[in-house]
Image: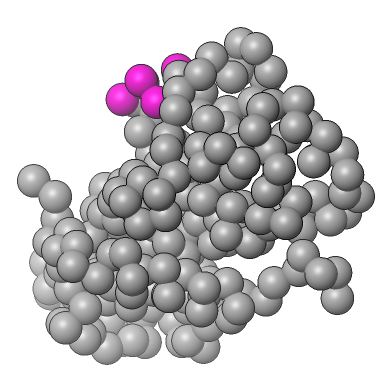
Amino acid sequence: MDKYERTLSQLQKIGDEILEKHNKNNSYYEVGIEYIIEAGFGIHIEAEPLKERYGVEAFPAIGKSIIYIDISLMDDSRQERRYRFTLAEELAHIILHSDIYKEVKTFNDYFKAERSISEDSYHRLDRNAKELAGIILMPRYTFINRAIEIRNDLCRSKAKDKNSLTDIEKNKARNQIVRILMDDFNVNQEPCEIRLERIEKGLNCSLFEMSLDKSFLKKRKP
């Protein structure tokens, strides 16, 4: 196995530890990723015109304890969900790949660090960082129990039992559930769908087979 490869269970464990330490007292579904980065890890978030200058949205400058992010991404409220995921992904790189980026202070340093690894390793880095970002932004048990609660509400509104739903009805309900989860956790559709699939696979159980544990439920942001 490549030294940069992480299994999903390893990434989940890392994410659980981060959330236990830095998100435990958060009463909302939406994870405060800026708070975790700045207060939890002591890393500053600084906006620069990265796309205009270098054609990238963000990079981790571990040597300066800074995550640089494109100013247009930070300032555009329409891209808030992309901004949040990008921050989480850069934090994931810092946690998982600090040996690669530890000397990075400038974009040129970052470019050299990226060129120092093989293309195959780069794709592993990127994949692992995206997985961990999703784990951090959508905490496993809070996320899946909120999905179950939404499922139950949808079934009640249609006077249907979850076990009597057809495959077409399940697919329709799943799409509705994902849309609500996107709002609750302030994430985009693709990472939300991937996270739901990963949790189902990890628990070896479909969303329509699970039971609700209310102890994991939180509040929606007003």
Give the residue displayed 42% in from the left and 38% down from the top: 44
Q: Which residue in the rendered view is the most extreme toward the left?
A: 222
Residue 181: x percent and y percent?
30, 56
Residue 190: x percent and y percent?
50, 49
Q: From the viewer's side, name the closer residue of 153 and 71.
A: 71
- Look at the image and tell me whether residue 151 can be seen: no
Give the residue displayed 69% in from the left and 26% down from the top: 107
Q: Is residue 127 above or below residue 54?
A: below
Residue 188: x percent and y percent?
42, 44
Give the residue displayed 40% in from the left and 26% down from the top: 74
Q: Quadrant of the N terminus?
A: bottom right
Q: Where is residue 145, by image quadrant?
A: bottom left
The secondary structure that dominates the magenta segment is helix
Q: Is residue 183 above or below residue 73?
A: below
> What span is colored magenta in the figure?
72-77
Q: From the viewer's side, name the closer residue of 205 and 76.
A: 76
Left or right of residue 47, residue 97 in this image: right
Q: Is residue 185 magenta?
A: no
